[in-house]
């Protein structure tokens, strides 16, 4: 496929996503290649979910541990029902929030045409229909489910622009479809419905209250264990991390710090997640601004306190993981 532009640092091919580029990307995917594509949450690194080779390549490119299963993307609930067993709760959530930033962990159909690598050998599968026209067009053109983790190197910040993907991944790793900036900017909320009690595995782009209004209270998964069968390895302690240390709930700048403000505070910040104090705007800016501040000039990135309401819960979750001591580091994904 002819690249529309080449990223200056990595030389990766970034393709402006017109109809021809989508068709070519879908062919590449069906041939076992990888395609990085935009969703409303973050960019995904997609491969044919039915192909062991493609799924293995995803793990290899990301440097991702094998035990960590992938989210399988589909065009709609009907496509998801060919892969997973839906109950009333799953149907209600999919009906209400798909396409959108919600991933459901469901019992995998025994005959589901999925690579065991995509589900890391579990008897469950994580499925989601993304609300992005390019992602949906790619799914339709490929005509099969697409396994896609966030398109970053394991443990690093998720990409919210095509340039982030091009800067992270080796040039030959994937075709990159450029859909501009991601509207939500935080990964999807993950709810596990494979057990009788619904469980929140990862707070994310869909606020928890909206889910609870549909299916009732969610239990919140605790722990950052990596015992080999993690419920959501996104819960591992250190994730989404910039390369320099972070200080949270900073109410004033200290010498040598690059400060990320919220709602105008603290003073003297280099960037502000949202001057208006809008948590949706802050979520959309989070990863891109952390990347901008992580440019090697600051000793520490200090981040203002973020309210623990609505999307603020997901923002604080990502910030806590990014700030976790390097000693806790593991090579788990996201
Ligand atoms: O917004 C998103 O969800 C993005 C975009 C690309 O869709 N994807 C994303 O994928 O964040 P990833 O692979 O970086 O995160 C997937 C999370 C991981 O924490 C993984 O462990 C969990 O989903 N997961 C996948 N399958 C699972 C399963 N069967 N049971 C429990 N957790 C699962
Ligand atoms: Mg990820």
Image (cartoon, rainbow, N blue to C red):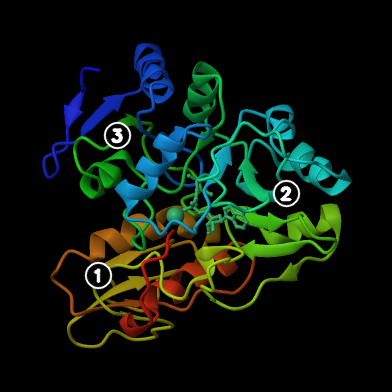
| Mark 3 vs 1, N-terminal side | 3
Quarter of the figure that contains the C terminus: bottom left
Q: Is residue 324 left or right of residue 227?
A: left
- How crowded pointer 2 is (Cα within 10 Å; few <14, some 14-19, many 20+) is rated as many
The image shows residue 314 at horizontal and vertical percentages of: 56, 65
Q: Report how far apart the C-alphas of labels 1 and 2 lie in the structure.
A: 35 Å
Residue 30, x across and y down, in percent: 43, 21
291 left or right of 230? Answer: left
Say if residue 121 shows up in the picture.
yes
138 with respect to 4 (left or right): right
Vertical position of residue 81 compared to residue 195: above or below: above
Circle 3 SS class: loop
Counting residues from the start of the chain, the first of labels 2 and 3 encountered is 2
Q: Earlier in the sequence, mark 1 or mark 2?
A: 2
Q: Secondary structure at mark 1?
A: loop
Image quadrant holding the N terminus, namely top left
- Seen from the viewer's position, the closer of residues 185 and 177 is 177
Say if mark 3 contacts mark 1, CB within 8 Å: no
x, y percentage for residue 45? 40, 41
- Residue on which disc 1 sits: 243
Tag nearer the camera, 3 or 1: 3
Q: Residue furthest top?
A: 20
Identify the residue shown where x is 85% and y is 44%.
Answer: 87
The mark found on residue 106 in the picture is: 2
User: Disc 3 marks which residue?
Assistant: 174
Query: How many residues crowd mark 3 within 10 Å: few (<14), some (14–19), many (20+)?
Result: many
Element on which disc 2 rests = strand
| Residue depicted at 39% across the width and 85% down the height | 251
Q: Inspect this view and state whether residue 38 appears.
A: no
Q: Is residue 8 above or below residue 267?
A: above
Real-space Cα distance between discs 3 and 1?
24 Å
Cα distance, mark 2 to mark 3? 29 Å
């Amino acid at each position: 496929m002819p690249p529309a532009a080449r990223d200056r640092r990595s030389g990766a091919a970034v393709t402006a996503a017109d109809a021809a580029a989508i068709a070519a990307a879908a062919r590449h995917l069906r041939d076992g290649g990888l395609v990085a594509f935009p969703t409303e949450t973050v960019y995904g690194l997609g491969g044919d979910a039915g192909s062991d080779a493609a799924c293995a390549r995803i793990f290899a490119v990301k440097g991702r541990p094998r035990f960590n299963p992938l989210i399988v993307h589909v065009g709609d609930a009907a496509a998801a029902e060919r892969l997973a067993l839906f109950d009333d709760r799953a149907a209600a959530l999919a009906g209400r929030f798909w396409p959108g930033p919600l991933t459901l962990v469901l019992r995998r159909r025994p005959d589901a045409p999925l690579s065991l690598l995509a589900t890391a050998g579990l008897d469950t599968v994580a499925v989601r229909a993304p609300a992005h026209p390019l992602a949906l067009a790619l799914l339709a053109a490929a005509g099969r489910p697409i396994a896609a983790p966030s398109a970053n190197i394991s443990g690093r910040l998720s990409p919210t622009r095509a340039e982030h993907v091009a800067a992270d991944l080796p040039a030959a790793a994937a075709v990159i479809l450029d859909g501009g900036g991601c509207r939500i900017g935080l990964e999807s909320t993950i709810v596990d419905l494979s057990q009788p009690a619904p469980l929140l595995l990862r707070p994310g782009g869909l606020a928890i209250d909206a889910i609870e209004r549909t299916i009732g209270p969610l239990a919140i998964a605790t722990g950052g264990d990596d015992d080999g069968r993690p419920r959501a390895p996104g819960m591992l302690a250190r994730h989404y991390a910039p390369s320099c240390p972070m200080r949270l709930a900073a109410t004033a700048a200290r010498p040598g710090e690059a400060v990320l403000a919220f709602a105008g505070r603290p003073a003297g910040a280099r960037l502000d997640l949202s001057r208006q104090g809008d948590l949706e705007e802050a979520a959309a800016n989070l990863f891109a601004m952390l990347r901008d501040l992580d440019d090697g000039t600051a000793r520490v990135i200090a981040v203002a306190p973020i309210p623990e309401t609505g999307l603020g819960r997901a923002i604080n979750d990502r910030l806590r993981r990014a700030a976790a001591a390097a000693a806790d580091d593991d090579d788990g994904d996201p």
